[in-house]
Image (cartoon, grey):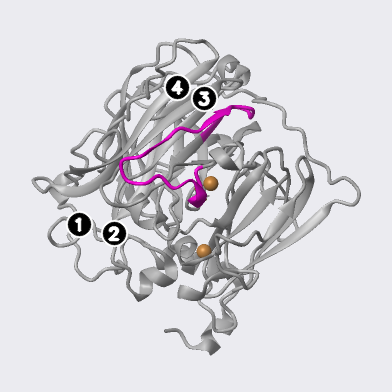
Amino acid sequence: MKSSKKKLLIGFGIVFFAILSGCSFNQAPDQDKVSSPPPEQKGKNALPIPPLLEDKNPADDVAEFYLKAQKSTKSFLDGVETESYGYNGDYLGPVIQVQKGEQVKVHIKNELGDEETTVHWHGLEVPGSADGGPHNAIKPNEIFSPSFTITQPAATLWYHPHPLHKTGEQVYKGLAGLFYIEDEVSNRLNIPKSYGENDFPIVIQDRNLREDGQLSYDLNMMSLMHGMHGDTPLVNGVFDPYLEVPQGKVRLRLLNGSNARIFQLKLSKDNHFWQIASDGGFLEKPVKMDQIVLGPAERAEMIVDFSQYKQGDKVQLFDQDVRLMNFIIGTPEKEKFEIPDQLTTIEKINPPSGTVTRTFAFQGMGNSVNINGKQMDMNRIDEEVQLNATEIWEITNIDNGMMGGMGMPHPFHPHGVQFQILERNGKEPPENEQGWKDTILLMPGDKVKTIATFKKDGVFMYHCHILEHEDAGMMGQFEVN
Ligand code: C2O
Ligand code: CU
Ligand code: CU
C-alpha cells in the first residue's frame, strides 16, 4: 500500500499511468497459481476467424438466427482441455451481421446445464423487452426469441450474457460475440469489407489459467476490488496468434472483451492506424492514431496500411509492451482501398431548452461499489425517461484516488441508446470520441457530459462495465415510456 502522503503528491497524469500499468500483464495476476502458455506456444497458432452466422430466413428484409449458449472444452494450453462456454461452439461465438432496416429474430437456447443466462445486444437500440438484460432470463433448456428492427447506422456491436450477478463469470468462461450492422454508408465506402480477408474481427481478452489449465473464476480481494484480470492475453480466444494479411489496407474491428482490463493498443515499428469507427458507428473523418486506449466493452474500427512492407514481414499488435498478436504480410491486395476524407455525417445533438440533466456518481469499493449511493435492485426503477426525450447525463467517477480511495476506473454503459459526448473534464472530447458511443471510460476523478435521445421504450440498465463491479451492484435501471 502506498502511503497517503505519497498519494497526495502524485498528479492526475501519474494516477492515469499508474492505473494502466498497475494491472499490466507483467505484474502479479489476481490469482496465486497460474500457468501461462509456455514460450513455445508463442506465435504458433493462426488467429481463428469466427464464422458468420447463417441467416435462416429467405426473405430479403428479415433475418433469422439461431444461437445456443453451451458448455464445451477448448485447448488454451497445448495438450490441456479447459472447460469453457461458447455460443454454437467452444469459446466466443459467431459474428451476426445484419442490415439497417432489417427485421431480426434470434432464437437463443440455453444449454448451459443448470444456470440461467440472457443474451444482451450491447449497443443495439431496441426496446427493453428485447434487450436481453437481467429481466430476460432464459432458464436451462429454454428458448428466448426476441425480435427487433435495426434502426441505427452501421456499427460493430457485440452480444454477451447479462444474468443478474453472474455476468462476469459467464463472459469470463467464453460467452461473447460480435454483432455487425451494415448500411448504405458502410456498403458504399471504398474501405476493406471482405469478412476474414481484409476485414477482421479482433476480440481482445485476458484470462487466468490455473495450474491445472482450467479457467477459474474465484474472486479474491484484488479481483473483487479491481475486477478480474488475467495474465494470459487472448485474441479471438487464442494466445499470441498470427494472421496473414494482404499487403495493403486492412480493417480491424477491435473489441475489448475483457472483464476489467484496460488495453492501451499500438502497433510495432512506429506504425499508426486510422480509427474510422467508435462504439456506435463511423466517425465523420478518420482519425490518425499512434495508440488507442480501450476500456472494457469499447470498440474501435481501424484501418492499417501494410502496403509499405515486404511479403513475409511481421508487424505486431501490443498492449503497452505485451505482444497480443502478429500480422504476417502476404500477397498484395486485390483491390485498392482509400482512407476516405469523409466517412459519414453525424448530426450533433443540441440540447433543447429545458433539457433534463441527470447526474450519476460512481463510487465505493469492493462489495460496496454503487451509483449515486444505490446498488442494483431489480424491483426499483432509478430513472424515468420520457420516450423520445433528449437528455444530458453527467457521469462522475468520484474516487480520484487522492482521498485514500483506490482510484479505480469505471467504464459507464447505458443500454438501448447511443450517445454523444459533450464534454470530457470540461473540454471538448478528443476527435475519436466525437462519434457515437455506448460505453465511456472514466478514469479516477473524470467527469463526462453525454447527450442522447431515448428512442426505444422499456426498462434498461446502466452500469459500470467492469463486470465484477456490475455484478457487485454498480448498476441501476431506467425506464423509457
Ligand atoms: Cu455490455 Cu449491460 O452490457
Ligand atoms: Cu449493453
Ligand atoms: Cu467500475
For residue 231, the mark is: 2
> Measuring 46% from the left and 52% from the top, which residue is drawn there?
264
Q: Which residues are magenta?
A: 132-156
> Measuring 59% from the left and 43% from the top, which residue is drawn there?
128
Amino acid type shown at disc 2: Asp
Sort mark 1 into few (<14), some (14-19) or many (20+) by Cα contacts within 10 Å: many
**Residue at numbered disc 4:** 64
The front one of 231 and 71 is 71
For residue 4, the mark is: none
Disc 1 from disc 2: Cα separation: 7 Å
The quadrant in which residue 255 appears is: top left
Amino acid type shown at disc 4: Glu
Q: Secondary structure at mark 4?
A: strand
Image: 79 above or below 146: below
| 21 relative position to 477: left or right | left
The quadrant in which residue 396 appears is: bottom right
Q: Earlier in the sequence, mark 3 or mark 1?
A: 1
Across and down, in percent, residue 313 comes to: 30, 30
